[in-house]
Amino acid sequence: MFPFALQDAATRIQSQFETVLGNLRPLPLTQAMGYATRGGKALRGFLVLEGAALHGVSPDRAIWPATAIEAIHAYSLVHDDLPAMDDDDLRRGLPTVHRKWDEATAILVGDALQSLGFELVADPRCHPDAGVRADLTLSLAQAAGARGMVLGQALDIAAETATTPLTLDQITDLQAGKTGALITWSAMAGARLAGADTAPLRRFGDALGLAFQIWDDVLDVEGDAETVGKAVGKDAGRGKATFVSLLGLEGAKRRAAQLVHEACTALDIYGEKAETLKDAARFVISRRN
Amino acid sequence: MFPFALQDAATRIQSQFETVLGNLRPLPLTQAMGYATRGGKALRGFLVLEGAALHGVSPDRAIWPATAIEAIHAYSLVHDDLPAMDDDDLRRGLPTVHRKWDEATAILVGDALQSLGFELVADPRCHPDAGVRADLTLSLAQAAGARGMVLGQALDIAAETATTPLTLDQITDLQAGKTGALITWSAMAGARLAGADTAPLRRFGDALGLAFQIWDDVLDVEGDAETVGKAVGKDAGRGKATFVSLLGLEGAKRRAAQLVHEACTALDIYGEKAETLKDAARFVISRRN
């Protein structure tokens, strides 16, 4: 069942981080890397583990890309929170890394977590076939970099100084990079590990990623900081275009629900086995944080 | 001959960056990525190309890891120069990325260049054997991350707030990470591409990397900012332990020369073919910037 499967994924990934980080020299840097990787929902890692299970891939292998994507996600949050970026003091209800340590440590923690993500997918324990590992590495680098996540972040920064708010097409494009690329990679990783067709999980991931971001915009309007675990109302306060400002609150919720339906339909080919992933998609538009 | 081989490597790598970055969306981010990767000596990329040539590996393959390591090196410089880190206004004689653009752009440029580095070594055009690509990726992630370069940077930051200056062993350890890890990876990449024994090039790289850093400390004392292309006298001004403060100026120069001798001896097994790499090692302790 979904909520338990998500919790279980978070626990396994946490344990893998402890093993991996425990092999590094004890320093404020490595303590802060542990701090930055704790307490998340591990939705992306869950998608990897569940997509792998769908293809009969052992969790002992899938844990490597699952932990890798959470390392990359954690790096992006640490850098996003920096004063020069979103300047956030809270993350997951706790002080951000640059508030608890300092900016230099936060920059290095993000840099080291990015390297760690690639180290984990390239580890021979991830998969005995080097072709699979090279495929995971290449696709992860594309999803994380200037044609994926960082592209989305750069478009987001450009939008803040633009004279006109973004259109729906533009914000959809931006989010496909910023949030979508890692979510789609996570969804597809299991099929890559199995050498199976990645197309259904790609469609699932693309729809889910967009639904996820639309729901983030809904929470920014409807949520309170304590439940969400970070500052809310920031986008509306800045007069920034969001899915809610463009579609209205109800329109945004309808669009998210439609996307979750599309995501689920993409997995019909897998039958009953895909129920947990479908539940995860439904969860994305019911979550309060 | 060495100086021409270095210039030739820089030109080839520059051209490869133009091709690769030309495939990205034109944005301030990608312009700044181009800016950050121009004008360097490309010593690390040269080591990759020359180590590959030593093993008869085609430059069409070696250009991928050569460009990859220069992307990783460029990312580290962009982040090092940030106000929260070294706070430098000049790099290679030009304004640093955060001075020419802004801090947010500089953070993202570094992040995207790190991803790009991994994208380049994982590219099938780098080597047809996925095992070689996975090996290059794993070793690069280890060299760049929290057991290599970033470890060295974290030790460097810790040293700045320590109550006692570093000992020679501690500073040697710090530099083995901060500068040494990428230089050794560069030296070894050609042997990895060829599936050859990496041990001689590892010894060469380890000695060369340390000589390189000792010479940087010499330049910080002897150089002027215009020739060096960045601020000088900073370390002495901060009362920070350096190879010069620990060994004296002449002692540091002697140690660097001794290391260059060790580096050259490690390559004797290759005979005449290794002359250009040996010249490169000698260049490291004669350079003025």
Image (cartoon, coloured by chain):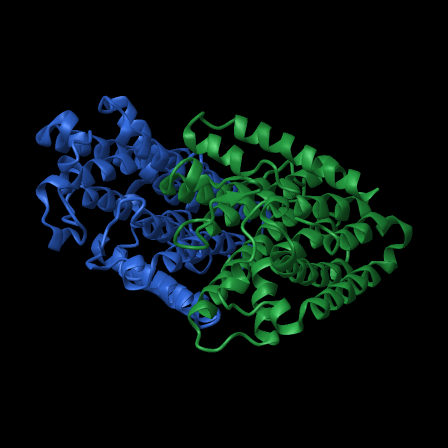
Chain colours: A green, B blue
Q: At 64% across and 45% down in the image, what residue appears?
A: A227
Image spot of residue B105 (x, y percent): 39, 60
Q: At 48% across and 52% down in the image, what residue appears?
A: A80
* Res B22 → quadrant: bottom left
Q: Of B133 and B143, which appears nearest the observer?
A: B143
Image spot of residue B274 (x, y percent): 30, 44
Tell how many labels.
0
As drawn, is B93 to the left or to the right of B78? left
Q: At 13% across and 37% down in the image, what residue appears?
A: B237
* Res A265 → quadrant: bottom right
* Res B112 → quadrant: bottom left
Image spot of residue A27 (x, y percent): 42, 27
Q: At 26% across and 32% down in the image, what residue appears?
A: B160
Q: Is residue B57 above or below residue A116?
A: below
As drawn, is A274 to the left or to the right of A72? right
Q: Of A129 and A210, which appears nearest the observer?
A: A210
As drawn, is A276 to the left or to the right of B206? right
Rendered-image quadrant of the N terminus of chain B: bottom left
Q: Of A218 and B173, which appears nearest the observer?
A: A218
> Can I make out residue A147 in this image?
no
